[in-house]
Amino acid sequence: MSACDVIVLGAGPAGASAAIEASKAGLNVVLLDAGAAAGGQVYRAPPGSFRVTDAEAMGPDFAIGDGLRQELAASPAKCFFGRSVWHIAPGFVVRAVFEGNTEVYEAPTLIVAMGTHERVIPMPGWTLPGVMGLAAATILLKSQRILPGENTVVAGTGPLLAAVAASILKGGGKVAALVELSTRMDWVKALPSLISRPDLLKRGFGWLGELRAAGVPIYRGHALTAITGDAEVTGVEIAPVDAQWRPLAGQRRTIAADSVTIGHGLVPSTEVTRLMGAKHEYRHEQGGWVALRNEDFETTIPNIFVAGDGAGIAGAAAAALRGRITGLAVARRAGRKIDASRETTLRAQLGKAERFGHAISDLMQARPGLIETMTPETIVCRCEEVTRADLDSAIRDGARDVNQMKAWTRCGMGPCQGRMCGEAAASLLAAVQGGDRSKVGQLTARPPLRPIPYEAIVGQFDYADMELPEPQPG
Amino acid sequence: MFDTAIIGGGIMGCASALELAEAGMSVALLERRFLASSASGVNAGTLSLTDVRAALVPYALRSVELWRTLSERLGFDIHYREIGSITVAFNDREAEVLRERIAAKAALGIAVDIINAKRAREIEPALCEDVKLAAYCAEGGYANSAATGRAYRLGLIRAGVTLHEQAEVTRIERNGDGFVVSTANGVSLNARRIVLAGGSWLGGLGKMLGIDFPVHWRVSQVSVTERMKPSVSHVVSHAYGLLTLKQSDNGTILIGGGWQGKGDPERGPAEVLPQNLIGNLRLALQTIPALQGTRIVRTWLGLQAHTPDAMPLVGPIPGVENAFILGGVRTGYTCGPYVGKLFADILLGKEPELPLFHAPFNPSRFTAPSGNERLALTA
Ligand SMILES: Cc1cc2nc3c(=O)[nH]c(=O)nc-3n(C[C@H](O)C(O)[C@H](O)COP(=O)(O)OP(=O)(O)OC[C@H]3O[C@@H](n4cnc5c(N)ncnc54)[C@H](O)[C@@H]3O)c2cc1C
Ligand SMILES: Cc1cc2nc3c(=O)[nH]c(=O)nc-3n(C[C@H](O)[C@H](O)[C@H](O)COP(=O)(O)OP(=O)(O)OC[C@H]3O[C@@H](n4cnc5c(N)ncnc54)[C@H](O)[C@@H]3O)c2cc1C
C-alpha cells in the first residue's frame, strides 16, 4: 500500500494539470491512468516507437500535449501509468490493476479527472465491422496513425466531425461525406459564445476549408438513418432532420463508403462519483449527469474533487484550467501557500474557456428526435444483444427508470456496463416521460469499474490457509 | 376502501398480493421504488433446497412447486431452471457440518443424498479435485431475480391489484377498524387491513405504528463473470452456506454466498468490502477451477432483513388490530411464493396447509404483550 496526500485519477489535461499544481505546492501527489502516457483523449501521446521529426506538422494539440507531459515529468508528482482503477473505498483507498495484479493506493483526498465517453445513438447497421466511434477513430489516427478505412463517412454532431475528417485527409484517406445533424443556423446561433476563443474558432474554419478544398460533400441538418452492407460496410443512407433531429420521411439518399465513424456528443464519465455516493444533477448542455460541486470543484462527498470534462463537458482548454484550479484549491485547503493572484487569473481564463466549451457541448448534445434512427430490429446493447424492440416492450410493461430497464432487459449488463448503450436506453425511457432525462435516473455504478481478470482480485492463495467466516445459520 | 393494503413490493408483498387478488380481494400494493427493486430483484436467484435453513425446508419444498409454473402464471419468463444442487465440503470439519445439516433436512422430506468425491465429480465435472464430501439434490435450481419485478408487475395488474410505485409510505393512521395509508408522493388510501412487507425497512414501518421490531439488515454481495463456455450445470454451494454459484443460459456465472458489504436502509447498499469480495471469489475458484482466466464484470450488494434469531417475522402485529407483518424470511426468494400463498390463505380465512403464525415466526416473540392499542397511543 502506498500512501500520499492526494490521488489524482486520470492523466488527461485536467488530471495532469491538477497533479502539477498540487505537487508543486508541496503536496505528495500520486497520479494514476490506464493509458501508457499522460495526455488523455485530446493530447494522446503517439506510440513510443513513433519519432516526431516535424512537430509543426503534428498540429497544435501535439505541442500542447507534449508541453504538458514535460511539465508533469518535471513536477514532483509520482505518475503511474497502465493502472486501471477498479475500486475505491471511503478514506480513500484506491485499487488499480497493473499487469494483472491489484495495487492499492491510499490518500485522504481524491481528484477525479476521468474524462468522457462518447454517445452513439444507434441506427441499423452500426454493429458492422468498419463502423467506429469518433473517439476510437481519433485514437487510431492520433496514436497509431491508422485510417478507419479507405473511403469513410464521418457523421454525427459537433466539431469532432470536422477534426476527424480533416485528420483522415491528412493521413491520405478519402472522406466520402461529412454528415452533420446541426445546421449552419445552429452554428451561427452559437457564434457569440464561440468568439471568446478566436484561436479555436479559426482552427475549426481551417478544417472546413481543408474539407472543401478536397471536395468532400457536407450535408448539414442530416442524420445517418442506416449503414448498409452484409458482412462489411458498403454505404450509408442519410435523411434530413427536423428541429428535434427526427429524420424526415421519404427523403433518403445513399452514399457509397467502406467505413463509417460516428458520434453524438460526449458524456461525462461519472462512475467514481456515483460509486462513492455523491449527488449528481442532469445538465443537458454539459453532456448529462454531473456531480454537484462547489467553486473549488469539491463534490458533496468531502475531499472528493472533480476536474475536467468529467465534471461537465467544456473542452480541453477548460479541462486543463479546471485541473490547475482544483490542484491549487486542494493545496490551499491543506494549508500550503499558493499564489492567490494566479488562482484569480486562472479562474478568469476558465470563465472564457467554459463559455466556449459549453456552447460547443450544447451543439453536440443529441436531441430527442434522434431516437427514431433506431428501428425495432436495431441492436442497442451490443454486449447483450438487446434490440430497440426489446426496450420498447419493457417500456410497455412499465419500465420507467434506467436501472429497472437494465434489470428487465439486460441492456447495459455486459462488459461495457452501459457506457455504449446507456444513453440510447435512457433517451427511449425519457421519450415516454415528457423528454425529461432527469426523471429516468442514472445507472448505479458498481465495482469493478472495468471488467478485471479474476486472478487480479483473488491473487495467490492456499485454501488450507483461508479463514472462512462462521457458517451461515443452518 | 381496499380490503388490504400491502406496503412493500418485494417478493413477499407481491406474492401475497397476487394470491389475495386472485381470490377476489381488493388489494393495493404500495412500493417505495419499483416492484422487486431491493432484495427480491438483486438476489443471487438460488432456489435450491439444500441451501435453506432446516426450519424453512417444508416451505421451500412447496415453494419450488410453485416456482415451476410461476412464469406461466405471471405471463413473463423469470427463467426458472430446475438443475438441482450440489453442496461441497473440502475438509473434515466442513464434512461434519455438511452431514449434520443434510441429515436434518432429509428428515424434513427433501430427497438429498450424501455422496463421495468421485460421485460428485461424475455428476458435476466442473468441481475441483479437493472435494472431500458432497450432497446432491435433483430438485430446485435457480431463477433470474432481475426479471422478478417485471413478471409480478404483469401478473399483479392482470389480477386487478392497484399498484402504486415510487410511493414511499410515510404515515399510517387509524380510521375506525381500518387504516389511512399516506405516501411521500401524495397518495392516500383507505384499507381495512394493512400488511407491512417492507423487507429491511420494517423497523421504520413498525415505528409508524408505535412498535419497535428488532429488524436489522445484512448487506449481501453477489458477483458475475463475463460469458464463459458452458461448464457448470448445477447450483453449486458450500457446506457453510458461504457460496452459491450457477451458470446462466447466457454463459455468465453468478457467485453469491452472503458475504457482507456495507450499507443501511437510508443509504441503501453502499460499499463492497474488498476483503469480502476476495474471500467470496477465492472460495468460488477453489470450488470451480474453470473460473481461472475469466473476468469479473460486476459486483453488487443488496439489503436483506435480519432478525435476532434469523427466523421470519410473520403474523398479526401485537396490539394493532388488522395489521400484519410479513418479512425477515431468510432465503426469502426461494420461499416467497409459498409463504405469500399461506399468508393469503390465512387472511382469506382458510385453514393454512402449514403453520405460519406459530411461535417461531410470530412477532409477539419480540414485542412485550400489551393491552393497549399502540397506534392509538401514538396518535
Ligand atoms: C475523440 C475525442 C476528441 C476530442 N478532441 C477534442 C479537441 O480537439 N478539443 C477539445 O477541446 N476537446 C476535445 N475532446 C474533448 C476532450 O475529451 C477534452 O476536452 C479533454 O480531453 C478533457 O480532458 P480530461 O482531462 O477531462 O479528460 P480526458 O482527456 O478524457 O482524460 C481522462 C483520463 O482518465 C483516464 N481514465 C479513465 N478511466 C480510468 C480508469 N478507470 N482507470 C484509470 N484511468 C482512467 C483515461 O485513460 C484518460 O487518460 C475530445 C474528446 C474525444 C472523445
Ligand atoms: C444480495 C442478496 C442475495 C440473496 N440471495 C438469495 C438467494 O440466492 N436465494 C434466496 O432464496 N434468497 C436470497 N436472498 C434473500 C431474498 O432476496 C430475500 O429474503 C427476499 O427477497 C426478501 O423479500 P421481501 O419482500 O421480504 O423484501 P424486499 O425484497 O426487500 O422488499 C421490500 C420492499 O419494501 C419496500 N419498502 C420499504 N419501505 C417502504 C415504504 N415505507 N413504503 C413503500 N415501500 C417500502 C422496499 O422498497 C422493497 O422493495 C438474497 C438477498 C440478497 C440481498
Image (cartoon, coloured by chain):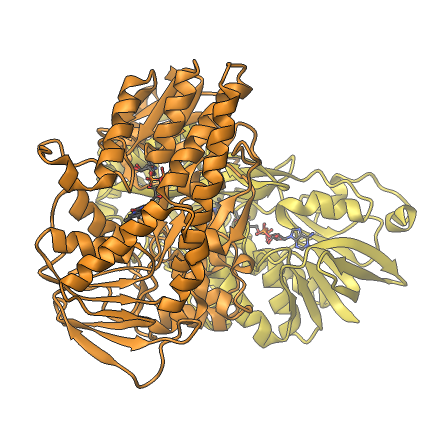
Q: Where is residue B282 drawn, in percent x and y?
A: 33, 31
Q: Is residue B275 left or right of residue A80?
A: right
- Please determine whether, in this image, residue A27 is positioned above or below residue B326: above
> Who's yellow, chain-wise?
B
Q: Where is residue A278 drawn, in percent x and y?
A: 54, 39
Q: So how many labels did they put on this image?
A: 0
Residue A163 visible (yes or no): yes
Q: Is residue A221 left or right of residue A260?
A: right
Q: Is residue A321 left or right of residue A54?
A: right
Tell me which residue sits at (49%, 46%) in the image: A290
Question: Quarter of the picture for ligand 1?
Answer: top left
Q: Nearer the viewer, residue B288 or A364?
A: A364
Q: Is residue B52 left or right of residue B198?
A: left
Which quadrant of the rendered structure holds the N terminus of chain A? top left
Q: Where is residue A102 drawn, in percent x and y?
A: 30, 27
Q: Where is residue A434 drawn, in percent x and y?
A: 55, 69
Q: Residue A188, located in which quarter of the rendered image?
A: bottom left
Tell me which residue sits at (39%, 18%) in the image: A23
Q: Residue B291, located in which quarter of the rendered image?
A: top left
> Who's orange, chain-wise?
A
Residue B222 visible (yes or no): no
- Please determine whether, in this image, residue A438 is positioned above or below residue B268: below
Q: Nearer the viewer, residue A160 or A302?
A: A160
